[in-house]
Image (cartoon, coloured by chain):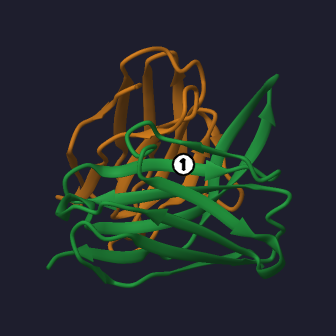
Chain colours: A green, B orange
């Protein structure tokens, strides 16, 4: 059974660093890309970045300067760290598994399993 | 970045058809997917590749389109379908539409 669960601090002060852990079960991090998506009142759902099954990363240019995604495969965990937090970063942060489907000659990359989300409030 | 435009809300009656549109700012070919998000829950994949039903998704959900114009349909609408529906493209990175909130008339 595929499961993902985010754990985070809940409240972070402006200018500080956000750290969220996504713990997965039912599949291997070395077989799937893992995505981070956030949902904020101001911008809705935003793709933040991913870590490939091989361990390399890609980031949305909007977050690239302050975002880091890493993992510990031995613990089945993926980590998000984002610095220089602002009040606009308040929202729910999701980790999601990326799967690919092949149909009619094309590969489609979708987020087929999501965690329940970690709610983050940026406030002093 | 590819921008996806959805209408913000749609009111339907139970048992009727609901049709939600999504327009992309440039062609995404068929790399458009649809998610359902109920209040307080995470998104759930319903449709991938514009028209393919994800595993376990009821056949009353369907999708169509290619290029820049896509449609998501629920027919017939059931009470459990009340949620917000998002389109998402994976042609160039990933972007989501702002969501269409499905409401009951």
Up the image or down, B72 lies above or below B29; here it is below
Return the x and y of residue A72 as percentages of the image width and height.
75, 72
Residue drawn at x 47%, y 62% is B43
Up the image or down, A119 lies above or below B103; here it is below
Q: Could you say which is closer to the camera, residue A90 or residue B62? A: A90
Q: Quadrant of residue A73?
A: bottom right
Task: Let me know if residue B40 appears in the view.
Answer: no
Residue drawn at x 43%, y 15% is B26
Residue drawn at x 40%, y 46% is A63
Q: Is residue B89 left or right of residue B57?
A: left
Pointer 1 local density, CA inside 10 Å: few below 14, some 14–19, many at least 20: many
Q: Tell me the chain of label 1.
A: A
Q: Is residue B35 left or right of residue A79?
A: left
Task: Let me know if residue A63 appears in the view.
Answer: yes
Quarter of the figure with the N terminus of chain A: bottom right
Q: Could you say which is closer to the camera, residue A82 or residue B48? A: A82
Which residue is identified by label 1?
A49
Quarter of the figure with the C terminus of chain A: bottom left
């Amino acid at each position: 059974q595929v499961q993902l669960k985010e754990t985070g601090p809940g409240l972070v002060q402006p200018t500080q660093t956000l750290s969220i852990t996504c713990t997965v079960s039912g599949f291997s991090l070395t077989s799937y890309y893992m995505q981070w998506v956030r949902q904020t009142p101001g911008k809705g759902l935003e793709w933040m970045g991913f870590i490939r099954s091989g361990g390399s990363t890609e980031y949305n240019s909007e977050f690239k300067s302050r975002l880091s995604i890493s993992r510990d495969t031995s613990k089945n965990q993926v980590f998000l760290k984002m610095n220089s937090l602002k009040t606009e970063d308040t929202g729910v942060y999701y980790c999601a598994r990326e799967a690919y489907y092949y149909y009619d000659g094309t590969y489609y990359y979708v987020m087929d399993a999501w965690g329940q989300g970690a709610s983050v409030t940026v406030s002093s | 970045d590819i921008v996806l435009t959805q209408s913000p809300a749609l009111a339907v009656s139970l048992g009727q058809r609901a049709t939600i549109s999504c327009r992309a700012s440039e062609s995404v070919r068929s790399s458009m997917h649809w998610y359902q998000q109920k209040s307080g829950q995470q998104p759930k994949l319903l449709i991938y590749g514009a028209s393919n039903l994800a595993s376990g998704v009821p056949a009353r959900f369907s999708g169509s389109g290619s290029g820049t114009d896509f449609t998501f349909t629920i027919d017939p609408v059931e009470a459990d379908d009340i949620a917000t529906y998002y389109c998402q493209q994976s042609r160039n990175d990933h972007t989501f539409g702002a969501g269409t909130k499905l409401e009951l008339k």
